[in-house]
């Protein structure tokens, strides 16, 4: 899986797992935790916001910065984000099942 999709999945999965807790730690989805550049993380966060996968995050543009910072305003996963996780999870299961069948039946 591509680093972008892995990072997106991890962000959404973390937000989904934290739905029952109050006071989400925004640092748990930081670029350091995901082991990606800050610029890549920023662009992924912008995509997640623009595509309505997450909500409760405000982009803050500071003078002299090339890319924005994000302020946690009660960040949460949206219905679209939950659907993305579900579809991605099902596709992974199908891919793994097909791989197992292919490994089991020689010549496929």
Image (tube, rainbow, N blue to C red):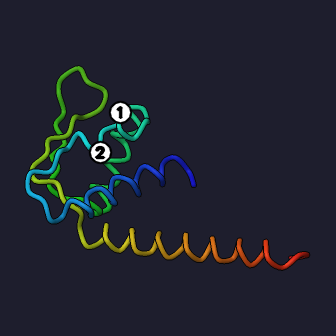
Mark 2 and mark 1: Cα distance apart in space: 8 Å
Residue at position x 36%, y 32% from top?
38
The quadrant of the image that shows the C terminus is bottom right
Foreground residue among 18 and 69: 18
Residue extending farthest to the top is 64
Residue extending farthest to the right is 107
Residue beneath label 2, please?
Answer: 29
Other-residue count near label 1 (Cα within 10 Å), few / some / many at <14 / 14–19 / ≥20: few
| Picture coordinates of residue 88, whole percent (x, y) | 47, 69
Question: Along the horizontal axis of the image, is 34 left or right of 57?
Answer: right
| Picture coordinates of residue 19, whole percent (x, y) | 18, 64
Tell me which corner region of the image, top left, top right, bottom left or bottom right, holds residue 9: bottom left
Q: Is residue 40 above or below residue 94?
A: above
Foreground residue among 87 and 68: 87
| Picture coordinates of residue 46, whole percent (x, y) | 31, 48
Residue at position x 39%, y 41% from top?
34
| Picture coordinates of residue 50, whole percent (x, y) | 29, 57
Tell me which corner region of the image, top left, top right, bottom left or bottom right, holds residue 14: bottom left
Q: Is residue 101 above or below residue 59?
A: below
The quadrant of the image that shows the N terminus is bottom right
Question: Along the horizontal axis of the image, is 92 left or right of 38?
Answer: right
Question: Along the horizontal axis of the image, is 69 left or right of 34?
Answer: left
Secondary structure beneath label 1: helix
Residue extending farthest to the front is 104
Foreground residue among 48 and 108: 108
Q: Residue 32: give its label.
A: 1
Residue at position x 26%, y 43% from top?
28
Residue at position x 35%, y 33% from top?
32
Secondary structure beneath label 2: helix
Question: Along the horizontal axis of the image, is 4 left or right of 47?
Answer: right
């Amino acid at each position: 899986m591509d680093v972008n999709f892995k990072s997106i999945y991890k962000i959404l999965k973390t937000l989904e797992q934290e739905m029952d807790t109050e006071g989400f730690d925004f640092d748990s989805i930081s670029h350091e935790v995901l082991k990606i550049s800050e610029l890549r993380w920023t662009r992924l966060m912008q995509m997640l916001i623009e595509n309505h996968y997450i909500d409760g995050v405000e982009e803050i543009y500071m003078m002299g910065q090339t890319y924005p910072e994000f302020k946690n305003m009660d960040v949460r996963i949206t219905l679209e984000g939950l659907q993305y996780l579900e579809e991605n999870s099902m596709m992974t299961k199908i891919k793994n099942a097909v791989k197992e069948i292919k490994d089991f039946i020689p010549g496929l």
